[in-house]
Image: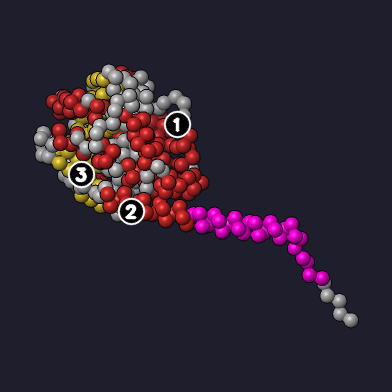
Amino acid sequence: MRFTRPRRSIPRRSGARVIALGLLALTVTAGCAVVDRRADLNEAQAEARYPATGQFIEVGGKLVHAHIEGTGPDLVLIHGASGNTRDFTFALTRALARDFRVIVFDRPGLGWTERAPGKFGGVLNRAAESPREQARFLQAAADQLGVTRPIVLGHSYGGAVALAWGLERPKDTRALVLVAGVALPWPGGLDPMYRVTASRIGAATVVPLITAFAPETRVNQAVAGIFAPNPVPPGYLRHVGAGLSLRRESFRANARQVHQLRAHMVEMQAHYADLTMPVEILHGTADTVVPAHIHAEPLAARLADARLTLLDGVGHMPHHVDKAAVVAAIHRAAAR
């Protein structure tokens, strides 16, 4: 007689657990597929509705988008977080193109510009480009466009990149203009959402949900918050293309750049004595996104040739709320 080992049976409770886990996995997989399809559709619609308006320059195998208008001395414009060239082409470039060749860049990973290659970003580029890495990347594109001794204007996060541009090429930068610009490390932290979406888990899970399902009303509220206490100009939301910023890769790039920005400002501030070119600083007194008393006022005191203009009652978007003041500052920078 041959004895056989009895087959081990799966207890009913364990079997039920396995079935439940299997159903959960199928549900999650199906849910992810739905999210991805919805995100793909929204991204395609945004790109069709807001195409590139300028030309592309290849830098290290990556494409940089530059919108160019006008003739005259070179003026480079660098947009802020979650932005693109359309923030400037809404109204500002028309006011400047009579007197300058205006070159508006999409920053790395935003708008229609791709992420910077390793030679410009190094190892850290896999996570996010620093302001100095972004400046070098855009300078390489500017060189191909024949840009010489430009005035460089940066708004918000773009202010940090403009400062980095001056640090990278102090003798070849005619002047800097900072509009509500980030300039120094700030006390406290960021909105927790940046920490979530900048993480690997959040980038893989939360960001696709935002791309797929962010309601238009929430986007409009976010833009209104950036302009507060000033109103959003009529037609701005139709022009600026917020959907481009909600694309998954753009959203991830922006989150990582903003999340790491403070550490880069700690390093950059140690070199501000090297910025001997004229610097025009414009900042609204009602700006709660990048407060003047943390950035503009102490920066003006530290620079060798800075002029500070505080705009009473203006929030974070002076180039829309008081365009004339920004244009005047650019002309002063050119004259100085």
Query: Element at badge 1?
Result: loop
**Which of the labelled discs sits on residue 67, or is there none?**
3
Q: Nearer the viewer, residue 294 or 6?
A: 6
Residue nearest the observer in this picture, 26 or 196: 26
Q: Quadrant of the N terminus?
A: bottom right
Note whether residue 329 is visible.
Answer: no
Q: Residue 19, which numbered label?
A: none
Q: Is residue 237 visible?
A: yes
Q: Residue furthest bottom?
A: 1
Q: Which residue is mark 1?
A: 190
Q: Percent position (x, y) of residue 323?
A: 20, 28
Q: Quadrant of residue 95?
A: top left
Amino acid at circle 3: His
**Tag 1 near tag 2, CB within 8 Å:** no
The answer to the question of whether label 3 and label 1 lie on touching residues, with beta carbons closer than 8 A, is: no
Tell us which disc is closer to us: 1 or 2: 2
Residue indicated by mark 2: 44
The region drawn magenta spans: 6-32
Q: CA distance from mark 1 to mark 2?
A: 30 Å
Nearer the observer, 20 or 126: 20
